[in-house]
Image: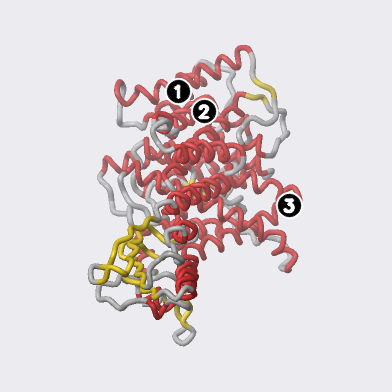
Amino acid sequence: MFDRFLAASTEGFAVPSATQFRIDILSGLTVALALVPEAVAFAFVAGVHPLVGLYAAFTIGLITALIGGRPGMISGATGALAVVIVSLVTQYGVEYLFATVVLMGLIQVVVGAMQWGKFIRLVPHPVMLGFVNGLAIVIFLAQLGQFKIQSAGVVTAGPGSAHGVGGGEWMTGMPLYLMLGLTVLTMAIIQFAPKMITRIVPAPLLGILVISIIAIGFNLDVRTVGDLASIEGGLPPFHIPMVPLTWETLQIIGPYAVILAAIGLIESLLTLNLVSEMTDTRGGASKECVAQGVANVVTGFFGGMGGCAMIGQSMINVKSGGRTRWAAISASLFLLSFILFASGLIEQIPLAALVGVMFMVVIGTFAWRSIRIMARVPRSDALVIILVTIVTVMTDLATAVVAGVIISALVYAWNASTRMRATTVNEPTDKDVKVYRVSGPLFFGSVASFNELFDPKNDPATVIIDFMESRVVDHSGLQAIDALAAKYQANGTTLKLRHLSKDCKELLTKAGQLVEPNPDDPSYGVAVDYDLQHGRLSTGH
């Protein structure tokens, strides 16, 4: 496993062409500029110092860039985690937050080591569409906070503030007009610069530079990054969380760590899939879980608030042309250099420019095609898209995805349960023998339909059930076969079962001896048993 992880971690480190390397570095600079206000805002939401968010963005971004499963994907402090963190910080303090982040990271490492990241493939496409739509709306709402005037030192927390619409008063008059005008101008530059001006500089970076020059050159009275908070600081200091190592501490941080680990992995893996689709490349899900876990363990010991993949910044990177690990690495190093050396310069960047960049991310992230196909897809899929979108906005990503997967699974189970069919014919060699040819999956959802196919009271003296076009999926299916065999035996009917797997025959308690041996019998596992003699898992083969 280590060899596979090492191979995946070095993917994207091959020296790119001079052109691609330049694009990666400039893309990283663009991402770093957009990371600053996001990290500061999410730190405010979580109720911690801005540097706690910035340190998390640097540490997590750098580590996942080095060893993650998706070259070019950007990670850092996110709002999805911040809304969970705030209650922990409010009740117990920031030291418990650091301890929670360390435990969160350890859980994620275990998930990756067990290679459970592969289960992200069970997320249906309608859930993915709802995920991107919901996050696009969340990113949009988060930017609305920049159109509000906050009182100095006042930090609002909670779900509403995570979306950027909690607390403060809306701008009016000339400040609002300037903010809107510069935001729209930034969006126009991003949209038209690649076609009309140049492709040498990524369009988002060009938009930030032009708007900054205009604002500083004309001495415009607009809100800047420095109005949020000072980002000046030193290197992240090593810090062991100052919490008692007791069972009571584990009881406090354990539930938070599990929730944060789940949210972080779900958002990271869905973002990984999205970026993979956009770049037509493959990513390593379990390796990304390990990388996220290692990053959170480290950031917990260096004063960071924890984090995961950031879909907004990842979209900026992809749209700007960033493809290799160098883009994400440069973004993290640029962010650290801002903190150490260039805080005064970065704090002069107008927030309108960064809001314009994020608005373009929203437009590019939202799955507009989901609106067009809503009337053509099954109603259940349309419902899942809408539900996941709404729940993502109203609560959090993990809840939305779990709800979407559960509904999709129930719909699938219901549809599969209605596919159980049987045709009846007479045995060619004996007209008094009735043959049921069953088709469709036999599982807990289709047991009722399966039982309705047979008529034990009126069937002839010999009945054959042929499972060639069916498959027994679970223990409920086995139990249904056993119960049916008991009914036929009670009526004195001879029952024979054909084309059941060896695994089925071994697991049937009453009807196992009724299975006819046949060289054409299928081979598949029904249940997973633990082989105590060999100390390993066995599927019955």
Q: Quadrant of residue 245?
A: bottom right
- Name the residue: 61% across, 61% down: 103
Looking at the rendered structure, the secondary structure element under dot 3 is loop
* Of pointers 1 and 2, the one earlier in the residue sequence: 1
Which residue in the structure is indicated by mark 2? Answer: 355
How far across and how far down the image is residue 120, in percent?
45, 54
How far across and how far down the image is residue 250, in percent?
69, 64
Q: Mark 3 and mark 1 in contact (Cβ < 8 Å)?
A: no
Which residue in the structure is indicated by mark 3? Answer: 93
How far across and how far down the image is residue 367, in percent?
42, 34
Asked if residue 439 lies left or right of residue 110, the reply is left
Against 240, residue 529 (above or below) is below
Q: Amino acid at mark 2?
A: Val
Which residue in the structure is indicated by mark 1? Answer: 186
Q: Quadrant of the N terminus?
A: bottom left
Q: Quadrant of residue 167?
A: top right
